[in-house]
Image (cartoon, grey):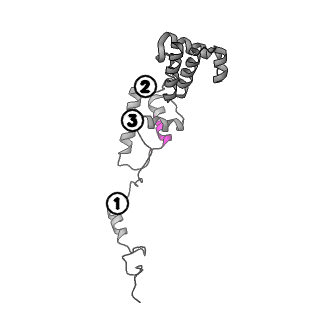
Amino acid sequence: MNLEKSKQLLALSRKEPNARKRIRLLAVSLFFEGENRTNIAKRLNTARGSVNKWVSNYLNNGVTGLNNKPIKGRPAKLTSQQLNTLSDYVKQSASSSEGGRLMGEDIAQYIYDQFNIRYHTDHIYKLLKKRGFSWITSRSKHPKQSKESQEAFKKVPSGNDPSHPRTSPFRAH
């Protein structure tokens, strides 16, 4: 019975993509082979207390007891409503006809001005990525540029135009 369970766990460990869970499955498999917990810890280069916890979790909850626990991090500084407000600000600024670029420092200053919360510039870019924004920008437009002056500039021969008779490589001599 125990040897059969060990083989099942070993087969599961070979298919498991998560390395941490794979080691837990292997530890429990070795336990069912009759290996003592100290030797299991030495073989897997882990603490004996960890092996005890894994075996106990398996005996109480089965394979699901070996799953990774959710990792909690520092709570977010901005609420979801504040994040939505920030997203609206970024969208509005990106589509503005005023010109210019929205930089990380500008967004950090906006967050501080609106919510009195400080963020490091590096974290601003991570925050924007989480909100679905990418930092790919188009060429900025000068607020005073005009279509007429651009069209007029295009008509001035520059010498780089291959259709122009002076720059054509197929000149008649």
- Residue 146 numbered mark, or none: 1
**Image quadrant in which you'd find residue 41:** top right
Q: Nearer the viewer, residue 21 or 89?
A: 21
Marks 3 & 2, CB-CB < 8 Å contact: no
Marks 1 & 3, CB-CB < 8 Å contact: no
Instruction: Please name the residue shown 35% across and 49% down the image.
Output: 97
Identify the residue position indicated by label 3 in the image: 87
User: Label 1, label 3: how many angstroms apart (C-alpha)?
Assistant: 30 Å
- Image position of 129 (left or right of 25): left
Identify the residue position indicated by label 2 in the image: 79
**Can residue 99 be seen at all in this image of the molecule?**
yes
In the image, what residue type sits under mark 3? Ser
Instruction: Please name the residue shown 59% across and 18% down the image.
Output: 30
User: Label 2, label 1: how many angstroms apart (C-alpha)?
Assistant: 42 Å
Instruction: Please name the residue shown 63% across and 14% down the image.
Output: 49
Sequence order check: which comes first, mark 1 or mark 3?
Answer: 3
Q: Position of residue 37 (x, y in %)?
A: 63, 14
Report crowding for label 2: few under 14, some 14 to 19, many 20 or more residues within 10 A (C-alpha).
few
Q: Position of residue 107 (x, y in %)?
A: 46, 38
Q: Which residues are magenta?
A: 102-110
